[in-house]
Image: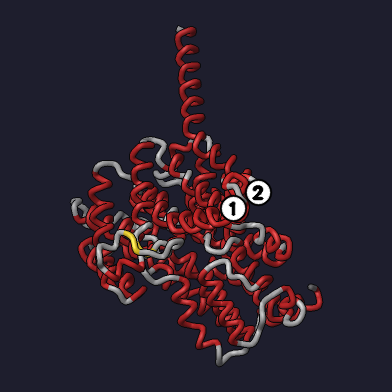
């Protein structure tokens, strides 16, 4: 490692490469903040540009765009309750309430610092623990992925602890929606009603835009507000968030970053699952879980550190095994192959300087993210000073253009409008849009891996042995049971404390 590390550090601090990092970060943050434009799209658009560069500079720029886009989604999530990328869904839970309370600057700074921290931790694992973590990722098959998704789905129990029935109904509706299209196991169409475009299924990003963005526009237009929220930037807000993180969020940030890295290892899992699991675990172990969803730093810290740590995790199997852990990692893998570089364990020896230059650049990118993101956050926050009607027109326009651009399909525009209406009217009766989104995200993975389990059972001779023979599966089952039981345990504890305080008050009287 040391033979390549010093030349790699020298490559990073070349003026051109530093400029490419800043350029990539700026472009990535803007792309991530715009509804419908994803990190995958941003990186893919810039791959042809890298053909005119040397491989090290090209990879550094692509890595910067990746990191910037994943963080950038949090800006729109906080300011207009629109997750710029699917991995920022959980960021809306506390980011937008903070914005409505006039604390938009705190929300933006908390997202920025948590994203940078998560990115550094994920890169640390990429640099020092690639081999053992890659071997661990290979242990995940159909049964392990199935139980991981069920564990992710069980977070509905914590998310909707105030009204479990409506949360479960919302999650079930999301799962039902995810079954539209071609059956991944049998290959026949379902719920398409003879309309061919539906055979492609419901795209996640338009559904998220509808659930969180379009529905929010309807809610805001139905209010008597002239602006989305008051924006009163306060001196010292950035340092106040730093102190809050250092004092109260150290364990939360580290735990969420580790969760993000581990989930990132698993092909197809992604930042949306990591951020929701991290948010759930933070809420579960907090002394006052009822605070979450009202605008707390801890919720932002969990979501954003997890989804940025996913980057380092997703790059581990890509570099060491040639198996991309995310869609963006798959695009970067294509760029490597286009430059004649074959990923695998030999990438650290045969092309060691390139591999370590790319990894070290991720450390520098996440550090540069703080000043670049700080300046852009100040600019983006000014959206709150624009009249609500103009902002609403802008959000709807971007939502329609962004959703159409994904597959050049009018179906996705109708999905935005349809899910916007469902979320708006569902919200009036207490339906949980977060649980609905979780069902849509996890549904395809659950169904695909359940099918794999049934196929494996034909070879194993027993479905029981497929589902329950793996130690990883058993651990995930235990975590799922704890996740489901947590709300009931917390409620019993709350009632016991209340009874004790009442009895103590009566004895004093």
Q: How many marks?
A: 2
Circle number at residue 470: 2
> Is residue 471 among the parts visible in the rendering?
yes
Q: Secondary structure at mark 2?
A: loop
Q: Position of residue 95 (x, y in %)?
A: 41, 53
Q: Say left or right for 181 vs 321.
A: left
Q: Say left or right for 497 vs 194.
A: right
Relative to residue 85, is residue 493 depicted above or below? above
Disc 1: CA contacts within 10 A as few (<14), some (14-19) or many (>=20): many
Which is more N-terminal, label 2 or label 1?
Answer: 1
Quarter of the image with the N terminus is bottom right
> Is residue 102 among the parts visible in the rendering?
no
Q: Say left or right for 24 vs 130.
A: left
Circle number at residue 144: 1
Relative to residue 324, is residue 154 depicted above or below? above
Q: Secondary structure at mark 1?
A: helix
Q: Position of residue 412 (x, y in %)?
A: 30, 68
Q: Are marks 1 and 2 in contact (CB under 8 Å)?
A: yes
Relative to residue 343, is residue 189 depicted above or below? above
Cα gap from disc 1 to disc 2, whole angstroms:
8 Å
């Amino acid at each position: 490692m040391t033979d390549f590390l010093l030349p790699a550090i020298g490559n990073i601090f070349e003026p051109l490469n530093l400029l490419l990092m800043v350029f990539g970060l700026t472009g990535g943050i803007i792309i991530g903040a715009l509804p419908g434009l994803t990190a995958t799209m941003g990186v893919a658009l810039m791959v042809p540009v890298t053909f005119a560069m040397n491989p090290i500079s090209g990879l550094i720029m692509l890595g910067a765009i990746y990191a910037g886009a994943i963080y950038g989604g949090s800006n729109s999530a906080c300011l207009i309750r629109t997750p710029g990328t699917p991995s920022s869904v959980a960021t809306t839970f506390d980011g937008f309430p903070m914005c409505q309370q006039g604390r938009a600057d705190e929300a933006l700074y908390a997202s920025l610092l948590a994203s940078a921290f998560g990115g550094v931790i994920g890169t640390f694992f990429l640099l020092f623990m690639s081999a053992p973590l890659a071997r661990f990722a290979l242990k995940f098959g159909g049964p392990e992925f199935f139980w991981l998704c069920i564990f992710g789905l069980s977070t509905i129990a914590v998310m909707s602890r105030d009204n479990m029935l409506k949360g479960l109904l919302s999650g079930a509706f999301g799962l039902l929606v995810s079954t539209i299209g071609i059956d991944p196991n049998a290959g026949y169409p379902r719920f398409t009603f003879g309309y061919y475009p539906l055979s492609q299924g419901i795209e996640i990003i338009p559904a998220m835009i509808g659930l969180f963005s379009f529905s929010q526009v309807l809610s805001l237009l139905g209010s008597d507000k002239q602006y989305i929220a008051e924006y009163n930037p306060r001196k010292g807000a950035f340092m106040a968030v730093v102190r809050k993180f250092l004092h109260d969020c150290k364990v939360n940030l580290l735990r969420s970053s580790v969760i993000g890295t581990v989930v990132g290892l698993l092909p197809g899992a992604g930042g949306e699952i990591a951020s929701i699991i991290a948010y759930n675990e933070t809420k579960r172990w907090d002394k006052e879980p009822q605070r979450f969803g009202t605008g707390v730093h801890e919720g932002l810290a969990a979501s954003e550190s997890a989804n940025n740590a996913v980057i380092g995790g997703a790059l581990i199997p890509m570099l060491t095994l040639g198996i991309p852990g995310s869609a963006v990692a798959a695009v970067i893998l294509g760029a490597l192959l286009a430059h004649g570089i074959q990923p695998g364990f030999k990438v650290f020896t045969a092309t060691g300087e390139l591999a370590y230059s790319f990894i070290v650049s991720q450390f520098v990118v996440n550090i540069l993210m703080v000043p670049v993101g700080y300046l852009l956050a100040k600019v983006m926050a000014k959206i709150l000073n624009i009249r609500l009607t103009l902002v609403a027109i802008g959000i709807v326009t971007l939502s329609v253009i962004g959703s159409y651009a994904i597959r050049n399909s009018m179906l996705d525009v109708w999905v935005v409008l349809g899910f916007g209406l469902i979320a708006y009217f569902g919200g009036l009766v207490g339906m949980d849009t977060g649980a609905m989104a979780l069902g849509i995200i996890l549904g395809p993975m659950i169904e695909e891996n359940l099918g794999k389990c049934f196929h494996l059972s034909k070879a194993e001779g027993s479905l029981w042995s497929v589902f329950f023979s793996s130690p990883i599966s058993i651990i995930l089952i235990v975590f799922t049971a704890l996740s489901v039981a947590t709300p009931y345990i917390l409620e019993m504890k709350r009632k016991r404390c209340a009874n004790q305080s009442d009895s103590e008050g009566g004895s004093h009287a």
